[in-house]
Each structure stands twice: as structure tokens, then as C-alpha cells.
Image: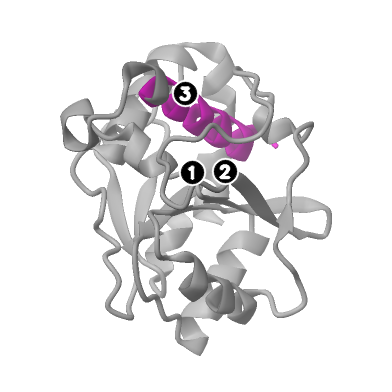
Amino acid sequence: MRFYILFVLAAIFSFSGKAQPYSYQIALAKYNGGGDWYANLETSLPNLVKFCNKNLKTNINPEQAIVEVGSKEIFNYPFVHLTGHGNIIFSNDEAQNIRNYLIGGGFLHISDNYGLDQFIRPQLKKVFPELELVELPYNHPIYHQKYNFNGLPKIHEHDNKPAKGFGLIYEGKLVCFYDVECDLGDGWEDAVIHNNSEENRLKALQMGANIIQYALTQ
């Protein structure tokens, strides 16, 4: 598949450091249901890409793509980010498309922007009815890439519950990482948007870089 070729090129570049055209692009997922898929549209992913290109020596296109979850274009992107506060609905065809994408080597990161959790869980069941979201242990490799974390950093307080990272594991492979009570995506945005401290923003960017590094090299 085309996206798998891009995936391999990206992984190779991560460790070569050689100048070349952008190896790949990452995308923000656009979905139906009325929820605000565009919640962090302006600066979130672009800031994360900038951080990764500087600190991981990746070669990601600085311009994010926007891809509909039911589109075949999703296969062009090795990494897709999904966020929002409200309702989300996958049609049967969209759920099958996401399933095919993830089984084929793609990676989905979901960030609950506060209010998404109750809606996204049943939709993920449409994608993988045979799987359960499992909380990842602190020793999982996703927390120990370039940066070491004992679980997810807490970026926004929301309900004052601990930040948790969940995953969908298909045939032994983590294909979807879901952060809850954490709000990584908000932490990637410009500081003036949420008045996050520089310490929290750095933690969010480092954890985001870990997720991208893990997704592109597992």
C-alpha cells in the first residue's frame, strides 16, 4: 500500500538525518456526528510536527492534512490524530475504512478534549468489535521513546482524575492510542490559547513526540 511505503521512508529518515523532500505528512481526522473535530485545528499538530522535526530529526511536512475518516485518502498518512469535545459517529463504511487502515499499518491517536469519551468508545467498538480498550502499563514502550514518562502527563485538570492512556491492540500490535483526562492536543497548542505553563506544554510535546516515534518505528 502507498501509505506503508511512506511509513517505511519516514522510519528510515528518523535515524538517517539526511536532507530530502518531506518523507510524509500526518493528518487530522474529520468525522460526522456534530462534534468539533476541528477543536485544535490552528496550532496543535503544526506545533507537534515542528517539535518532532527539531528534536527527533524527523522530516514531517509542516502542513497538516485533514482527512475524512471514510476516505481512501487516509491510507496516505501513517499517523492520524483525532480529537474533539462532543458527539462522533462512524458509519459502517467509515468504521470498516478505519479498521482496514489500522490493520494495514496505520496508527490512530485519539485525544479526549473533554467530553469525547462517552461518544468515542462505542464508535471504536464498531471498528474493532472483538477488542477492548486496555489501559497501558507505565512500562509500555510508548512511554519510553526519546522521552521517559511514568504514564501520561496531566495537562488539563478537567475532573481532577488521573490521566490515563488506553490502547487497542490487534494481533499483538498497538494500533490506536487514546489519552483520557490528559488533553495532549491542547498542550500542543500555542501557549496563549490555554495559558498552559511552559512546563506542561513541554511535557505534552514530549509525550506527543513519543507517540509519533513509536507509531513510525514499531
Query: Which of the labelled discs sits on residue 192, or is there none?
Result: none
Q: Tell me which residue sits at (72%, 52%) in the image.
A: 135
Cα separation between marks 2 and 3: 13 Å
Stretch of the chain drawn in magenta: 201-218
Tell me which amino acid carries mark 1.
Cys
Residue linked to disc 2: 163
Crowding at dot 3, Cα within 10 Å, few <14 / some 14-19 / many 20+, comes out as many
Q: Where residue 182 is drawn, which disc sits there? A: 1
Report the residue at 71% width, 50% height from top. 174
> Judging from the image, what secondary structure is the residue with disc 2 in?
loop
Colour convention: one colour
Is residue 213 found inside the magenta-colored segment of the image? yes
Can residue 195 be seen here? The reply is yes
Rounded to the nearest angstrom, the CA distance separating label 3 from label 1 is 11 Å
What type is the residue that disc 2 sits on?
Answer: Ala
Report the front residue among 80 and 150: 150
Q: Which residue is mark 3?
A: 203
Element class at badge 1: loop
N-term mark: 3 or 1: 1
**Magenta stretch encompasses residue 50:** no
Q: Residue 31 location in percent, x, y?
A: 34, 71
In contact (CB < 8 Å): disc 1 and disc 2: yes
Seen in the image, is 71 located left or right of residue 209?
Answer: left
